[in-house]
Image: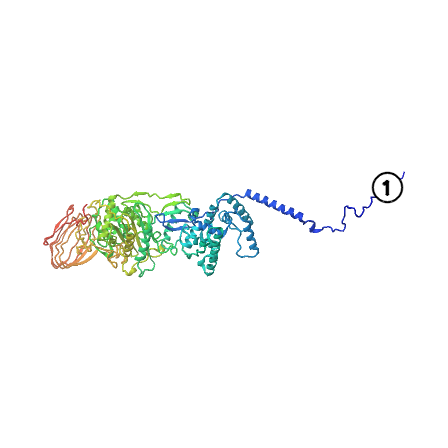
């Protein structure tokens, strides 16, 4: 059977249509096989999906963080005691956050027109803005911005950092969208305006408004609002006060912002045309601690830290601190020192002033120096110059507490040199006030010898206890030495003022303070000072101390304070010519002023003599005038108040029972000598008239001076002595007339005095006493007349004195001993006069 063969298909005709194969079409090779429209489309789609997924993941994982520390940092503002007058501020960044309602609408609209005209419409970011920024960058435009909206800038400042990275930019974008969805636009704008930098160290519109225009932000007008919005872009380029080029750029930018406000509908064209650039204040380069008030800020800062606030809280916590400082009193302190301080030979002379409110402890004024930046050492707080005789009121308080009275008598002559004292103590100018001088008069004339005599009786520890209770620090400045009463220890002007405030408060002590109230950044009270007072002296004791200090003003060393023309108590003080004090009080205010020479810890180590042309720089002169000028201005407007009446505490007969001192004549002119030792072999030849009863320290600026001058003879240099040296108790005098004095005394110790003299007249004096010991004295004299004196004494020891001279006349005197004779009156033979021994009471009876 033949094989079957499949027939070949017929060739289609030319006219027939069928598949055609282009065998000659080139085959794609290389990159063309990969890159084509199809792959490009899929790639774009893939990238879009990947980006969308990335954004979705970013939105899922990126949360809105807590605000950064920088954005929330706010200056701590310190106020005077009215809570309104600003004293200064602490800040890492000078920022003061304000509410949206305090920001004028004109400023908000000006910033929108300048920075982000689509702010109220966009969703937190602007695609066109970013595209425009990219295009400017590609063109190399140096002023190209980042294309960020106000919301993005706010997020960067408020939540993020300033680093330039894609990661930060992504987070910024995501958070901006979320913030735009969650926070009101006006609040975003307000937060942005509170965080943005305005140059000159200012962050936020409040501090910027004050810096550029001197007003709070809510007081800005349209032109000022536009100006701030113009400067905002770059303060270093657009602050018109920095030069003509800046001024030109500012003018152009100002117009740009104004035109933008017309475009956004924030203002009309007519208003824009009528708006001219405002005057911009130049930057005030002020150090926050500059000037005298810088010391106050330092004190506030130190107290805040001591209270438990830390550095970040103080610097960035936005606290509002009301202090105890009074603006009127502080201005008075600065003016008083500036106007009254000496200029002649006054190099390196420092002045410290402090004032404290009694019964509260509020420090109302401090002058610590002219500038706290140039000199951080506070002359009123850090300096501890020796106190001098401003200590004496506290010695008096201690004595009154222990049964003494203002009429108690002590040694008033100079020198005072009992063996147990060591080097002798002298009065200012070696003035003699009598062997028996009352404490009242001793305070008036600041008699060193009487107060040291008193301190030896009651004990230095008793005086120290009174000082500490009043407000002196209990430190090594207070030594158990009888000279503590004449201020051999140092103390700051602030602690001195606070101690005098205890006297003014009639014995109520309060610790000094400067921080009265602290509010947190939300306006809530975080701290409020509550004064704690303690009675440390009885009112009657204080009444008598105050009375004695008013007498010191009325007729003593502190008379310069009479110019205050209201009830005032005060005391002067100097020490070794190296410090000069004036301290005192009214019922409402206590203050202390100290002058000294020497920087820093060397305060009060150099002589003040010659300063202001004064041979002796006394407390009653420049310090007294400074104190009075301050007080006059500080208490202006306060009602006049009276001090309590004196209480007359204590026993008038107490005092002078110890056998201290030497009998060097110069009787007290009526003071009682019964209670003081009668040195039978001592000098009976001095001036029985008692010397200068006034002893006015403040009156004579060149010589009268205070009471605790230096030791010019090499003896006591520890205060209160101007002539020092060791006096062996020998005095020589000449009587050219008739001696009719009466001398009465009781000696409880050993009298080793020596008397030598020449009498050219008639001695009719009477000396009375009882000797309980042995009188081995020898009397020889040259009398040109008749000596009819009678001498009687009481010796509880042995009188071994020697009385030497050549007696060329007739001696009819007699000397005898007996028991306890008490207080004695003697009739003056031939004089027809009666002298009552016991002194004259000069203090009124109440």
Residue 387 lies, in percent from the top left, at 30, 52
Q: What secondary structure is found at the residue carrying circle 1?
A: loop
Q: Residue furthest top?
A: 1
Q: Quadrant of the N terminus?
A: top right
Q: Residue 189 vs residue 839: left or right?
A: right
Which of these two is toward me, 467 or 665? 467
Q: Residue 205 vs residue 497: left or right?
A: right
What residue is shown at x 38% (from left), y 43% (from top)? 527
Q: Residue 45 vs residue 78: left or right?
A: right
Q: What residue sits right under mark 1 in the picture?
A: 5
Tag 1: Cα neighbours inside 10 Å, few (<14), some, or many (≥20)?
A: few
Q: Residue furthest front?
A: 15
Which of these two is toward me, 162 or 530? 162
Which of these two is toward me, 398 or 678? 398
Residue 340 lies, in percent from the top left, at 30, 57
Q: Residue furthest right?
A: 1
């Amino acid at each position: 059977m033949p094989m079957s063969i499949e027939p070949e298909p017929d060739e289609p005709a030319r006219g027939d249509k069928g598949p055609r194969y282009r065998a000659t079409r080139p085959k794609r090779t290389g990159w063309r096989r990969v890159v084509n429209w199809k792959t490009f489309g899929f790639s774009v789609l893939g990238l879009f999906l990947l980006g969308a997924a990335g954004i979705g993941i970013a939105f899922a994982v990126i949360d809105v963080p807590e605000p950064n520390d920088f954005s929330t940092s706010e200056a701590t503002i310190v106020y005077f005691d009215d809570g309104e007058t600003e004293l200064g501020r602490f800040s890492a960044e000078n920022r003061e956050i304000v509410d949206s309602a305090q920001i004028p609408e004109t400023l908000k609209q000006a910033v929108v027109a300048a920075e982000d005209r689509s702010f109220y419409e966009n969703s937190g970011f602007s695609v066109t803005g970013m595209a425009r920024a990219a295009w400017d960058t590609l063109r190399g435009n140096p002023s190209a911005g980042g294309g960020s909206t106000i919301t993005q800038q706010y997020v960067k400042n408020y939540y993020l950092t300033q680093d330039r990275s894609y990661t930060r930019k992504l987070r910024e974008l995501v958070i901006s969208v979320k913030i735009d969805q969650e926070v009101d636009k006006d609040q975003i704008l307000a937060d942005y305006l509170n965080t943005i930098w305005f140059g000159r160290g200012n962050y936020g519109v409040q501090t910027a408004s004050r810096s550029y225009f001197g007003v709070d932000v809510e007081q800005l007008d349209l032109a000022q609002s536009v100006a701030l919005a113009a400067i905002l872009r770059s303060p270093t380029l657009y602050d018109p006060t920095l030069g003509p080029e800046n001024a030109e750029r500012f003018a152009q930018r100002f117009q740009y912002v104004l035109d933008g406000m017309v475009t956004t509908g924030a203002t009309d064209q007519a208003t824009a045309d009528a708006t001219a650039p405002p005057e911009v204040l130049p930057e005030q380069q002020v150090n926050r601690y500059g000037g005298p008030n810088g010391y106050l800020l330092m004190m506030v800062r130190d107290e805040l830290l001591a209270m438990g606030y830390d550095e970040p809280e103080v610097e960035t916590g936005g606290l509002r601190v009301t202090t105890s400082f009074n603006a009127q009193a502080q201005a008075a302190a600065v003016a008083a020192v500036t106007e009254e301080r000496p200029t002649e030979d006054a190099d390196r002379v420092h002045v410290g002033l402090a004032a404290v409110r009694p019964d509260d402890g509020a420090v109302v004024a401090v002058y610590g120096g002219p500038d706290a930046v140039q000199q951080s050492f506070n002359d009123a707080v850090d300096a501890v110059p020796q106190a001098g005789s401003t200590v004496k009121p506290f010695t008096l308080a201690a004595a009154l507490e222990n049964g003494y009275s203002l009429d108690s008598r002590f040694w008033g002559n100079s020198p005072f040199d009992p063996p147990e004292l060591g080097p002798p103590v002298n009065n200012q100018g070696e003035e003699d006030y009598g062997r028996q001088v009352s404490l009242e008069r001793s305070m008036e004339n600041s008699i060193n010898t009487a107060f040291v005599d008193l301190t030896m009786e009651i004990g230095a520890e008793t005086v120290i206890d009174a000082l500490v209770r009043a407000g002196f620090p209990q430190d090594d400045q207070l030594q158990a030495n009888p000279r503590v009463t004449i201020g051999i220890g140092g103390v700051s002007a602030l602690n001195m003022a606070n101690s005098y405030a205890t006297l003014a408060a009639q014995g109520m002590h309060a610790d000094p303070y400067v921080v009265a109230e602290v509010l947190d950044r939300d306006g809530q009270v975080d701290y409020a000072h509550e004064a704690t007072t303690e009675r440390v002296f009885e009112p009657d004791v204080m009444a008598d101390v105050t009375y004695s200090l008013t007498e010191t003003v009325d007729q003593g060393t502190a008379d310069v304070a009479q110019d205050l023309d209201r009830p005032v108590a005060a005391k002067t003080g100097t020490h070794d010519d190296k410090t000069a004090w004036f301290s005192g009080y009214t019922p409402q205010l206590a203050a202390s002023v100290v002058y000294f020479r020497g920087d820093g810890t060397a305060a009060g180590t150099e002589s003040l003599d010659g300063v202001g042309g004064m041979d002796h720089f006394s407390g009653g002169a420049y310090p007294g005038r400074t104190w009075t000028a301050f007080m006059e201005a500080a208490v202006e407007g306060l009602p006049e108040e009276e001090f309590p009446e004196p209480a007359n505490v204590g026993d008038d007969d107490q005092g002078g029972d110890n056998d201290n001192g030497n009998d060097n004549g110069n009787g007290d002119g009526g003071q009682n000598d019964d209670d003081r030792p009668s040195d039978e072999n001592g000098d009976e030849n001095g001036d029985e008239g008692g010397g200068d009863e006034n002893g006015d320290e403040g009156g004579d600026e060149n010589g009268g001076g205070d009471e605790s001058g230096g030791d010019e003879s090499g003896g006591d240099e520890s205060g209160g002595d101007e002539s020092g040296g060791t006096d062996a108790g020998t005095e020589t005098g000449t009587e050219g007339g008739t001696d009719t004095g009466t001398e009465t005394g009781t000696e409880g110790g050993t009298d080793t005095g020596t008397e030598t003299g020449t009498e050219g007249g008639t001695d009719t004096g009477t000396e009375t006493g009882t000797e309980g010991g042995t009188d081995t004295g020898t009397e020889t004299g040259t009398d040109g007349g008749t000596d009819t004196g009678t001498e009687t004494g009481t010796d509880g020891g042995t009188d071994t004195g020697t009385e030497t001279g050549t007696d060329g006349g007739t001696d009819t005197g007699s000397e005898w001993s007996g028991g306890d004779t008490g207080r004695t009156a003697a009739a003056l033979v031939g004089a027809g006069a009666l002298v009552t021994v016991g002194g004259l009471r000069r203090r009124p009876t109440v």
